[in-house]
Image (cartoon, rainbow, N blue to C red):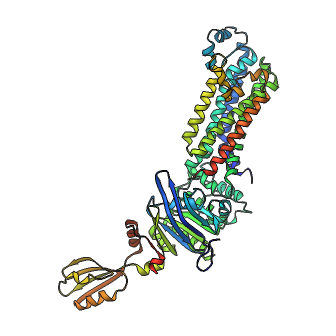
Amino acid sequence: MWTDVSRLDLVGRRRAILSYTLGMGLYALAIVALYPTFEHTTGLDKFTKDAPTVAALFGATGSLISPSGWLNVNLYANLFPLLVLLATIGYGAACLAGQDEEGTLAMVAALPIRRHRIAAEKVVAMCIQAALIVAVVTAVIALGHFFDISVSALDLWGASLGVLLLGIDFGLVAMAVGAATGSRGNAIGVASAIAAASYLVSSLAPVVTWIRPARFASLFYWSVGNKQLTVGLGVSELAVLLMTGVALASVTIAAFERLDLH
Amino acid sequence: MTTGAVGITAAIETVGLTKIFGAVRGIEQLDVRVEPGEIFGFLGPNGAGKTTTIRALLGLYRPTAGTARVLGLDAHIDSVTIHRRVGYLPGDLALFGRLTARDHINWFARARGLDGTRRARELSERFSLPLDTRAKDLSTGNRQKVGIVLAFMHEPELLILDEPTTGLDPLVKHEFEQLLRETTAAGRTVFLSSHELDEVQRVADRVGIIKEGRLVLSETVAGLRKRAPQTIEVVFRLPVDSHRFQIDGVRVVSSQGPHVVLEITGAIAPALRIIADLDPVELVSRHAELDELFLDFYRNNTVMTASDVD
């Protein structure tokens, strides 16, 4: 059956996925519930005006007390994508390289299942996990309507789609490195390093002139670094994130075909 | 299609199979042929290349050079078809810790497209496998039983088993050996990798010994027994000059006065004629145990095949 490998991984990780999703949902609920307390604290905006570079390091640019600014600085510009990345990079590194190191992947690969199908099903499993986390968190944020947070539903879900694709893309970087090297450590290390550099570039680009041109190389820019919460996820942004994902998935599948399994 | 002298497709045939890991040798120029319906014991010390060979046979490793054919199919190109017809028990069996034995069986049955799990249930009962305990809570022996059930449950034409009795108690080992005999009696083939010399000589029809990545022996167990050197201990009436025994096929193991121990390979008559001339009073003869022979191959670099013996 086409879903065997995906289901095996999802069933094995179901508790971790549900706990993680619940934790992130509760965090998002706390953020939206706190908004009425801070929405008139104009002193917060002074922070981004007086120390824009430091504020940018934390993903804070522009107004912090507008609904979109509040969500951006507390969720979309940093923790939301970073926590999704933790899940996807973690799974991306574990599902091929990690399981090969444990020895379980060879048991699956010795069954009558083609390698490209195994890799493709792992990609599907990662997408499902990331989609669940992003959907729950976004649904909770949408409750912000009851806490004075008025953001267009289209923009909100568009920005969340950006976070989802960002997470999947970096998870695929981890999968590709894992498939090419067979090392879980390399997979986590390379994907995390690229993600950190990408985050820094996107965060600092609005306030550091010489970094600005490099923002186009940052997946963070294409997903959450270009005011997606106020103007939505554009077609070009969607295309970049999707094409990157397709390219990385292709590299992963090709590399996995050649990987020696233990 | 790979066929032998009598036109039968080999269950396994490798030609010049080589796998190099960077600067590290895995296997080198390995030529192995396993006939259908036999139990082939694949012996060798740790690190000799047994597991590397098995992984290459299953297409898990891409060979650096040479070819491997399994059931007449290319091990790499036709790996999915081969996997459908082969049962595999890895040497360092890893199970999914949170899944029970029953979960494993059901998942493998679904992945293999089996209609049911009747055979798996039979094997589980036969080996007293606890089906509802999570794999991470099973003992080493019970985890190994799960691996055995998973390898045999689809009644494959060929079983590739890497150290299959690791962690099993003697009773279960005995039951497992019985299962191997039943398997070949039904016309199926077993490739049994092991360093358990006793086990292999009890169940195998033929053995291959691999050392440092190369096959140093390929022979039937019956042939090995036949050509195993004889040890003869003789007590003479008077001390003798051991130089009298310096003839082809005879090695003087020890000589102390009238007490001489000889190791004889091949015809025994020339040595017996010399012994008779020296007035023996007592003579004891025995064949070397096969495990002594295997150990000798482990230690030495002699490359020998059945054709050398014949």
Query: Image quadrant of residue B34?
Result: bottom right
Q: Is residue A216 visible?
A: yes
Query: Image quadrant of residue A211?
Result: top right
The correct choice, above or below, for B66 with respect to B247 in the image is above
Q: Nearer the viewer, residue B266 or B87?
A: B266
Q: Is residue B220 visible?
A: no
Q: Position of residue B154 (x, y in %)?
A: 67, 65
Q: How many marks?
A: 0
Relative placement, left or right, of B239 versus A194 is: left
Q: Nearer the viewer, residue B24 or B135?
A: B24
Q: Nearer the viewer, residue A2 or A195?
A: A195
Q: Position of residue B73 (x, y in %)?
A: 65, 66
Relative placement, left or right, of A84 versus B16 is: right
Q: Position of residue A172 (x, y in %)?
A: 66, 39
The N terminus of chain A - image quarter: bottom right
Query: Image quadrant of residue A134?
Result: top right
Relative placement, left or right, of B114 versus B34 is: right
Q: Nearer the viewer, residue B65 or B204?
A: B65
Q: Residue at x 23, y 89 (%)?
A: B281
Relative placement, left or right, of B305 versus B149 is: left
Q: Residue at x 43, y 70 (%)?
A: B303
Q: Position of residue B92 (x, y in %)?
A: 53, 56
